[in-house]
Image: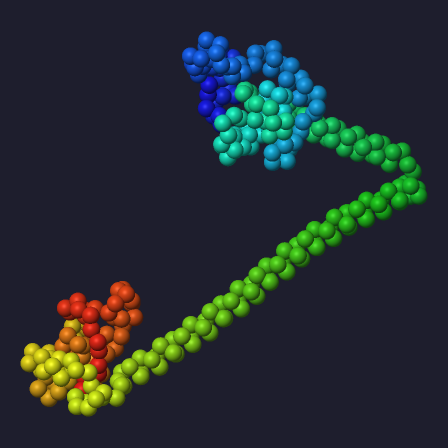
Amino acid sequence: MIPKGSSLRGALSYKDKMLHYDASLTAAERAGLVEPPLKPLTAQEWQTAKQLSDGRVDEICSICREPYRDSSQVILACSHTFHERCFLSYLRFADAAIARCPVCRTEAHDWTTHDGGLNAWRSRSATRIQRCWRGHRGRVRVMEGLPPGSRLRRRYAAQRLKATGRRIEKLGEARRVAVDKFLGDVDRSTLESSRMLRESLAAFESFRNGVKSAERGPPPVLLSGSASPSWLQEAVGKAIERGDCECPICYDQLRTIEGVEAPRQPARRAVTILSCSHLFHQKCLDSFESFRVFEKRFCPMCRQEYDRRPWPL
């Protein structure tokens, strides 16, 4: 059989459907040991099912509850009709071993295209047009037979003016509601933009204050005393021995002690020494750590875990 949900199935002829049906039978089903699936409907059986569906005047799809109008329509073997796209979507999302009708739950082993809903929609639309036209012609004939200035003519004109006024008022109300909604959206957007701007300015001001405090640097740590870690004196000795004079992150000059002081940098920037003896600007190292690339802190130079202290004076 054609796979369930195939959009080509409804367009196949009875001969093609029987070829697919015979090819899908198993050996046990051919031998009669197992009950075979239901056969596709013949043209006469489809005619009976379509007549039964047209007798109910099905104008609305039972799945989406929308009228058929000029959309493609399918009819099942049980005579229930649906939008083709709705029925195929139902089969795809149901994902059942046996396809069943969404209305009566009988096995939907076969379906084909149908235009009963389109014909019913055309018939109803034509009836409405004829009813409106006949009413209009009848009112015109009645008005033409009345003398000018008669009471009935004035009454008819007043009713027509009231109906026109109500339509204009309804249209104006709809436009007023749309304009109020648009202005409300503009106000909400303005308030949200103002809030975000205030938060951004506050965050920027906090960032500037943090940068200024970082540039001033923390109070110096002395080499002697119980507050100094054990590695600090050894790390300072190694840094002085190497003669480090530039930050490995920003490549700018480091201002440390007289032996490695940069003569072209008048402004002092706080310097930090790591336990591995490498030197960095404090601001550069703070920015490096702020990215939080690693769970642990590793030196940008030697990739070792480190402890940090301000450069001692």
User: Going 43% across and 76% down the picture, which residue do you hit?
Assistant: 202
Q: Looking at the image, how many numbered discs can be counted on the residues?
A: 0
Question: In the rendering, at what x and y percent does residue 207 appear?
Answer: 35, 77
Which of these two is toward me, 205 or 147?
Answer: 205
User: Going 74% across and 31% down the picture, which residue do you hit?
Assistant: 128
Which of these two is toward me, 87 or 135?
Answer: 87
Which of these two is toward me, 265 or 213?
Answer: 213
Residue 118: in sight, yes or no?
no
Q: Residue furthest left?
A: 241
Which of these two is toward me, 226 or 156?
Answer: 226
Q: Residue furthest top?
A: 31
Question: In the rendering, at what x and y percent does residue 150 appear?
Answer: 93, 42
- Name the image colouring: rainbow
User: Going 62% across and 21% down the picture, which residue do you hit?
Assistant: 78
Question: In the rendering, at what x and y percent does residue 29 appear?
Answer: 47, 13
Residue 201 location, quadrant: bottom left
Residue 296: in sight, yes or no?
yes
**Side of 270 relative to 84 (left or right):** left
Quarter of the image containing the C terminus? bottom left
As displayed, is residue 80 above or below residue 296? above
**Side of 244 relative to 180 (left or right):** left
Question: In the rendering, at what x and y percent does residue 194 appear?
Answer: 50, 71
**Side of 289 relative to 119 (left or right):** left
User: Going 46% across and 8% down the picture, which residue do you hit?
Assistant: 31
**Side of 96 relative to 152 (left or right):** left
Q: Residue furthest front?
A: 33
